[in-house]
Amino acid sequence: HKSHTVKEISTVAKTHQMEMTGTLENAKEVMTKLTGGIDENNRMIEQLEISKRNAFLSINQTFEILHQTLEERKKTLLSELEAISLSKTTALTLQKEQFE
């Protein structure tokens, strides 16, 4: 009986070892896939950050250009207003002088 029991334990141990080896191999495959997924996720996050930074710079640049354009337009309009005001004042002053 003793040798029979030892053989059974040995067989059970080998079977268990094979099962554990298979489980470990499966775990390694899963870890490889997870690592690949995490790496891909990190690449996507990095790309998103680059896109965000580019969009941020583009928005800032666009608004800076718009601001400059509006400032230039404001100066032009104020200058034109001043010229019109001066012209009207001069014309009214001349009319006033003609009636005096």
Image: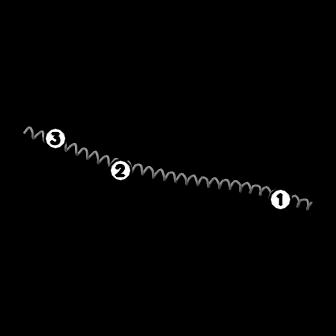
Residue drawn at 61 percent across, 53 percent down: 40
x and y percentages locating residue 30 in the rendered image: 69, 53
Residue drawn at 71 percent across, 56 percent down: 28
Disc 2 packing (10 Å; few <14; some 14–19; many ≥20): few
SS of the residue under disc 1: helix
Amino acid type, residue under disc 3 in the picture: Ala
x and y percentages locating residue 47 in the rendered image: 55, 53
Which of the two residues, 39 or 58, is positioned nearer the viewer here? 58
Which of the two residues, 62 or 83, is positioned nearer the viewer here? 83
Which of the two residues, 20 or 39, is positioned nearer the viewer here? 39
Q: CA distance from mark 1 to mark 2?
A: 80 Å
SS of the residue under disc 2: helix
Q: Quadrant of the C terminus?
A: top left
Q: Which residue is mark 2?
A: 68
Q: Tell whether label 2 touches label 3 (CB within 8 Å).
A: no
Q: Which residue is mark 3?
A: 91
- Quadrant position of residue 14: bottom right
Q: Nearer the viewer, mark 1 or mark 3?
A: 3
Which of the two residues, 61 or 29, is positioned nearer the viewer here? 61
Amino acid type, residue under disc 2 in the picture: Gln
Q: Nearer the viewer, mark 3 or mark 2?
A: 3
- Quadrant position of residue 42: bottom right
Q: Which residue is mark 1?
A: 14
Disc 3 packing (10 Å; few <14; some 14–19; many ≥20): few
